[in-house]
Amino acid sequence: MVYAHGKVKEEITIPPYEGRSTLLKPGEELVIIDVDGKQVGDFVCFNRNDSSEFVSPVHMRASLSSIRLKVGDPLYSNKRRPLMTFAEDTVGKHDFFFPACDYYRYKVDFGSEDHPNCHDNLKEALEAYGLGNKPVPDPINLFMNNVLDETGDYELSEPLSNPGDYVRLQALEEVVIACSTCSQDMEPVNGWKVTSLKMQIIEAD
């Protein structure tokens, strides 16, 4: 199934507990599909021609004056430039506040020494484009459903995404992106289990 107008250039399945990366040229679109529903995808993006520039959630929060990701929003970099545009969304609830889970998250909070984690998944996926030695930026957590209460505290809830729900992003620059199926199976972040995501790259008009 094609989730956007245009020709599918590439289709990539991201298995549970893993990450994948790809390159997009200006005007190409990236569709990230929640295959089975309730699966978060940790997403990062680098400027292909300047690896010191990457999509930065903290700069996005400042530039958008919001912690809510909406259709039409630019994905701003640490140099306060838009690298992609958030073009379509069938869910309406995502997060760009929380960092990627990492080794220390599972060791400190859950007593697990060898649990897969998004930080390492993303780092490994980025190696295909020579970026494995770069610090992994904080991600945009697609489909993640955290609820801010009246006191300003967060509660993590199951995603609102159903099977086949998706987001579509358009590249404004030549970018390398990576996405990991969130590895959290000890909280309701992914509905208590980890499933696959799918990426489609749509050719530019």
Image (cartoon, rainbow, N blue to C red):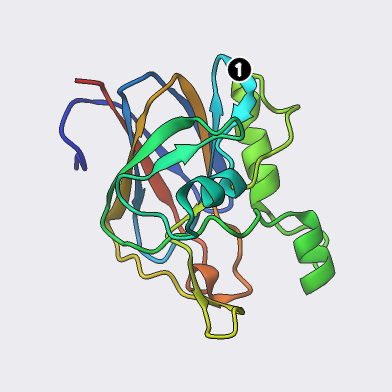
What residue lies at 45% left-to-right and 19% top-to-bottom?
174
Q: Do we see residue 138 in this rendering? A: yes
- Looking at numbered disc 1 in the image, what kind of residue is underneath it? Asp
Residue ID at (69%, 39%)? 136
Q: Quadrant of the N terminus?
A: top left
156 relative position to 145: left or right? right
Q: Disc 1 designates what residue? A: 50
Q: From this viewpoint, which residue is outermost toward the bottom?
A: 150
| Vertical relation: 166 (above or below) 87 | below
Residue 118 % position (x, y): 64, 50
For the C terminus, which image quadrant? top left
Look at the picture and state if 156 lies above or below 14: below
Residue 141: percent from left, percent from top: 51, 54
Count of labels in the image: 1
Find residue 132 and report its image quarter.
top right
Q: Secondary structure at mark 1?
A: strand
| Image location of residue 76, percent across then percent down | 50, 38
* Residue 18 appearing in the image: no
Q: Quadrant of residue 38?
A: bottom left
Q: Is residue 119 above or below residue 165?
A: above
In the image, is 4 to the left or to the right of 48? left
Q: Nearer the viewer, residue 171 or 182?
A: 171
* Residue 42 image point, x, y percent: 54, 50
Q: Residue 101, relative to residue 111: is it above or below? A: above
Q: Horizontal placement of 134 versus 177: left or right?
A: right
Q: Nearer the viewer, residue 133 or 78?
A: 78
